[in-house]
Image (cartoon, grey):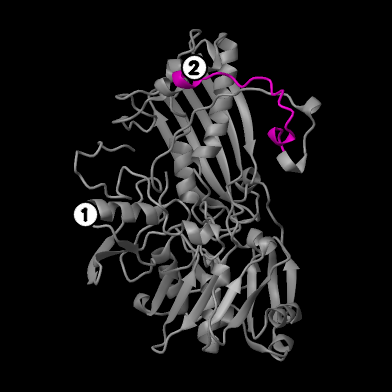
Amino acid sequence: MTSAPPRPGQRIRLGVVGQSAERPDGVPKVTGEFAYASDLHAEGMLHGQTLRSPHAHARIVSIDITAAKAMPGVAAVLTHADVPGGLLFGLEHPDQPALAKDVVRFVGEPVAIVAAEHPEQARAAVRAIRVDYEPLPLVSDPIAALGSDAPQLHRRGNVIKELRVVHGDPAATAEIVVEGEYEVAMQDQAALGPEGGLAIPDRDGGVTLHVATQWLHVDRDQIAACLRLPKDKVRLVLAGVGGAFGAREDVTIQIHVCLLALATKRPVRMTYGREESFYGHVHRHPARLFYRHAATRAGRLVAVHATIVLDGGAYASSTGAVVANAGCFAAGPYRVPNALVHCVGAYTNNPPAGAMRGFGAVQSCFAYEAQMDLLAKRCGLDPIEIRVLNGLVEGDTIITSQPMIGSAPVPALLRRLADLPLPGDDDDEDVMALPGGAGNLARREDIVRGVGYAAGFKNVCYSHGFDDYATARVRLDRDGDGLIAHVHTAAAEVGQGLVSVCAQIARTELGIDRVVVDPADTTIDSARAKRG
């Protein structure tokens, strides 16, 4: 972003739109003074721990918490019977129990929670809980889950979401046909800061939760339903977020720590270690993708057929949106006159899958770009050339019949990419230049360098017509040094620089230098973490 040069005598206002601005949270983060969710503390707080299922699919025969409740330092041991409101929650479809009742559907599903004076006392109490399980038939393959003889994991069946896209003539074909089957494995966001939160009971019977999340209001609504509290009795404040990448869109510790705080009438902090974090949050959807591309001998695309099966795991999370993205963007950023796409998300007994950067569009991109390379080889074309030939430009339509309005410079970007010099042979003796760096994980004689090309595209914001919006409030104060603006929004700063942008906009529009971006909370209308 650039701005016009200042006129003679014009005062240069630092940190406005068009100029670099110092991140308000930058110095505290690099000096180690920034408070992340795991740093939260309250006088007299208890520590929470979770008992998780060791089975991927089993019936809960009984839960005995007697010994755990009698252990030193234990203030509360809760099961599904202690959830005062609705047991189920979910980002798009409420199908996941706050604490498992009757059945567990994946390894790591929460069964009981404990609050104690010390983390070690809480962990000991968790180990003292006795659960009798009866293993059930499980399904771990999403394609098998769609079969008529598969164990049905939910009352409505194993299909979470199904989408068909038909564009042009689905029966169209051409001289050159390439087919491929592709698989994308589960991937974890592995944010540097695991989940953490501090719940403080309020005198009016409500609760205030300080938590690292991406969607304060969406979290609040799910928490309030499980606690059987009015939404205005559940206040969320954004704590320091150590990375998000989609994993913090879903509820993890939020309901549990609030239940414990209300049950004990004391502040409760709950944090996950790295292993528990892997169990506790959603992951990228594994996928199986079956593609068929048809093109003329000159390389022009005629048709794309795709069948995409996404593994949603035990609960729905954002699978509906991921299915929509995977299906709607299944043909890539190319002119495709004819298409037939079938995309489905299935329940399995694997860990729940949800949002992770570019969700849905990423899985499809891996497959259709591999197809474009195969097609280029069959047509005798350079991989860049076939992409330039078919790349979207303004005025084209994608397979959902949506016209490309505004910027769609796919061929231009690919040409610029092709004009870049290729990396040369690395004869630098500096071992830090080798893959692995200081870890010395590679030997020079083992290194083979190659160059690949890929193009992808995705919508901005959530997915599939989802109502994305944001609200902000600005308050002007005055002190001895003049005006100061306070910006208040519920949008989550998760590392993308939102606090910097808010301050820049306020300085630009209000014409003042001093801007403070107040902590995000639910006292203002909903907003979500920005996506791009």
Residue at the image point whose x is 23% and y is 70% from the top? 477
Q: Is residue 329 above or below residue 452?
A: below
> Residue 241 appears at what percent x and percent y?
51, 61
Q: Nearer the viewer, residue 43 or 313?
A: 43
Residue at the image point whose x is 41% and y is 20% from the top? 411
> Residue 43 appears at what percent x and percent y?
54, 86
Element marked by disc 2: helix
Say if the magenta span includes residue 465.
Answer: no
Q: Name the image quarter holding the N terminus.
A: top left
Q: Mark 1 and 2 residues: CB-CB less than 8 Å, in contact?
A: no
Q: Is residue 64 above or below residue 272?
A: below
Magenta span covers which residues? Answer: 415-436
| Residue 106 seen | no
Q: In this view, does 482 lie to the left or right of 23?
A: left
User: Which SS type dominates the magenta stretch?
Assistant: loop
What amino acid does circle 1 point to?
Gly
The disc placed on residue 278 is: none
* Mark 2, residue position: 419
Q: In this view, does 307 lie above or below 352?
A: above
> Residue 253 appears at what percent x and percent y?
56, 69
What amino acid does circle 2 point to?
Asp
The disc placed on residue 511 is: 1
Q: Which of 149 and 49 is in front in this view?
A: 49
Q: In this view, does 323 lie to the left or right of 180?
A: left
Mark 1–mark 2 Cα distance, whole angstroms, equals 43 Å
Element marked by disc 1: loop
Q: In this view, does 349 lie to the left or right of 84?
A: right
> Residue 310 appears at what percent x and percent y?
57, 44
| Residue 505 seen | yes
Q: Is residue 414 above or below residue 274?
A: above
Quarter holding residue 275: bottom right
